[in-house]
Amino acid sequence: MTDTTGLRRKIWIAFILQAAAISFAAVLGVYGASAVLKHLLIQRALTEEASHFWKRSEANPAASVPDTFNMTGFVVDAGGSKDALPVALHDLPEGYHSLPRSQGGALVLVEQHEGRTLYLLFKQEQVDALAFWFGVVPLALVLIVVYVIAWTTYRASKRAVSPVIWLASQVQRWDPKHPEVSALKPENLPVDVEGESLVLASSLHDFGMRIEELVHRERNFTRDASHELRTPLAVIRMASEMMQTDPICSPRQQKALNRIQGAVRDMETLIEAFLILARDGDTGLPPEPLLASEIVEDELEKARPLVANKPVTLELDLEADFKLVAPRRVVSVLISNLVRNACYYTDSGHVRIRVRFGEIRIEDTGIGMSAEQLERVFEPFWRADTARVGGQGIGLSIVQRLSSRFGWPVHLASESAKGTIATVSFPQAEPPKLD
């Protein structure tokens, strides 16, 4: 979590936007009030003053025009001279006008009555003063109050979310393999962690303890399973090999021993795959530089007993070798499952492995799969031919999980009765070093 996406910054931005919106609304309101004051109230005052003057003039033709601190009036008789008028008023038609500041900046009403023309001027300075004292000053006071309230609310909100932010920073520093949950113990929590934050901290502490237990159990399981499962299989393999060398073994017994050895090899591969996938995070196996051709050759030799009694040839087509830095056992399990799967479902023809730069392709002339079967091929324990002996229906599921774990995309193409092509890509491939 960075400062640009943190909860505290988001709250700060929300309050800034809120204060800006309130300020904009207040300024807009004052501007509207100023416009009302200028164009409605003062215009109405000038109109009523003009009406009052005409009434006085009817009663007393010698009545004087308005002449106050804020308002000045002029009357021009029909055909009379306009010399007494300010120059800015000479060409004004009848109606309401606002003079620019360069010409005095007054608000002017020009009205005619029985041949006489009345000019009433209201000083712009007074309008500005009224707008200032009845608009800008209250606006400033309102904005100050708004900003103080917004800042106070922000500080209160910041204090309210500070425990959540502290918890997030603690969890962010956790190592998934070794979560440091001691900081979330009740006695180690800051004093402001209370209420829902305290419940969240307690839940995170329990969750972290549970993770530690699971990691510890996973390590114990993989360690114990690695030893306890491999040892009896090694004993079975060695015993069957010794029995095969006994000259008194009949062909039927030899066949049974071959099946035992094949089952042992299947179990060893399956156990190896399960132990790799059971480990959380990395596999616990150190990466090392590998040559693709060496891995493929080893797996081909291991797979030869699977096609010993079938008219199937195992072929290696080395087009371009490449180097890969990865755990050897992981790559072996991945290629082994694909090769063994091809051998199980190929009754005649060939199983060919093509090695290209950054790619290993396993091609077979087996029973193949339809489009519907190909969609289910990665489902655990699903098999295209349930009547066929060999395989547990989990090899391709293991292949998919290993490819996802290590970033080695696997693609399958198949056609019924024509065979299957499995392609594994290795984006991390490097050219092999030449001695």
Image (cartoon, helix red, strand yellow):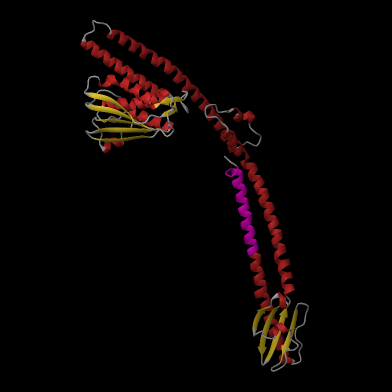
The secondary structure making up most of the magenta span is helix
Residues drawn in magenta: 3-28
Please indicate, yes or no, whether residue 105 appears anywhere in the rendered image: no
Q: What's the residue at 47%, 19% (across, down)?
A: 220
Q: Nearer the viewer, residue 131 or 297?
A: 297
Q: Is residue 364 visible?
A: yes
Q: Quadrant of residue 69?
A: bottom right
Question: Residue visible at 63% across and 42% down?
Answer: 160
Q: Nearer the viewer, residue 384 or 118?
A: 384
Residue at the extreme bottom of the image, as rendered: 79
Asked if residue 9 lies in the magenta stretch, the reply is yes
Q: Is residue 250 above or below residue 218?
A: above
Q: Residue at x 57, y 44 (%)?
A: 5
**Percent from the top left, x then y, of residue 310?**
22, 22
Q: Is residue 408 magenta?
A: no
Position of residue 89 measured from the top left corner of the image (x, y, whole percent): 70, 84
Residue 121 at x, y percent in the picture: 72, 80
* Left or right: 222 in relation to 370: right
Q: Quadrant of residue 232?
A: top left
Q: Is residue 411 above or below residue 103?
A: above
